[in-house]
Image (cartoon, rainbow, N blue to C red):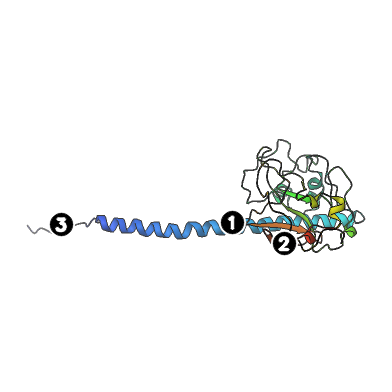
Amino acid sequence: MKTHPRATSRAFTLIELLTVIAIIGILAAIIIPTVASVRQTAQASVCLSNVRQIALAATIYANDNRGRLPDAGAGTDPLWARTLATYINVPASQKASIFVCPGTSIPVEETTNPYGPTNPTGDIVLTYGMHAGLMPRGQTALLVNQVKRPSEVILVADMCQDPNNKGWTPNSIEQPSIFASQSGGRGGSANLEDFISTATDDDTGNNRWMRYRHKSRVNVGMVDGRAVSFAKGQVKNRNVIIGE
């Protein structure tokens, strides 16, 4: 009876196995940072789109209200966001996400009283804030024509988060103090070419500063409706001062 030789199987040697593992490790080391960088770039793009939509909504609101910007609201009430939400042309289910940067460092907790079509007085969770000199809390907002350089002055920007308040952001940018001062915000003796301070760009407490969260850049919407990305340390007084 004729017999056939058995097929023999060849197992990986230890060296071959280690070589495969090393190659996988090298590929992972190359791919993972690239994926992370792509994700961060995508988040920055979405954030820039968010502030553009908010700034454009403020422009449309002002056109409908004799040139006056929306009131900020008093205290922590996000009145300005609720007001502008009605002017943002996206499905109702997506409106809340317009006011939250996708690149936030701290998870943002949802509210138990969310804004929506059936709850127009509900909360809108924020990680963006408005220029407090233009829209002071508890006071009437300014007219757009009081801004002498609308293409240069920041209206809305990414802000620091408060880890003690669900990761939400304060309503208004008030630091450095030139953002909050009606007199300083309109000029005074400040040099337009001086750079503003970025000293406390941290998600700590009730921090009312802009947040340079996108690879040390901050996304802002200007009074004229444009969106701009500034590198940290490159925002000037001319981007904050209203009346000169």
Q: What element carries label 3?
A: loop
Q: Is mark 1 on a helix, strand or loop?
A: helix
User: Which residue is at the far right?
Assistant: 66
Above-or-below relation of 140 to 229 = above
- Which amino acid type corresponds to the residue marked 3 in the rendered image? Arg
Local packing at callout 1 (Cα closer than 10 Å; few below 14, some 14-19, many 20+) is some
Above-or-below relation of 109 to 19 = above
Q: Mark 2 points at which residue?
A: 228
Local packing at callout 3 (Cα closer than 10 Å; few below 14, some 14-19, many 20+) is few
Q: Which residue is drawn at 64% across and 53% down?
A: 213
Quarter of the rendering containing residue 239: bottom right
Residue 7: mark: none
Q: Distance between the residues labelled 3 and 2?
A: 72 Å
Q: Mark 1 points at which residue?
A: 40
Q: In which quarter of the image is the N terminus?
A: bottom left
Residue 34's spot in the image, x, y percent? 51, 60
Residue 187: tell me if it is visible.
Answer: no
Residue 35's spot in the image, x, y percent? 52, 58
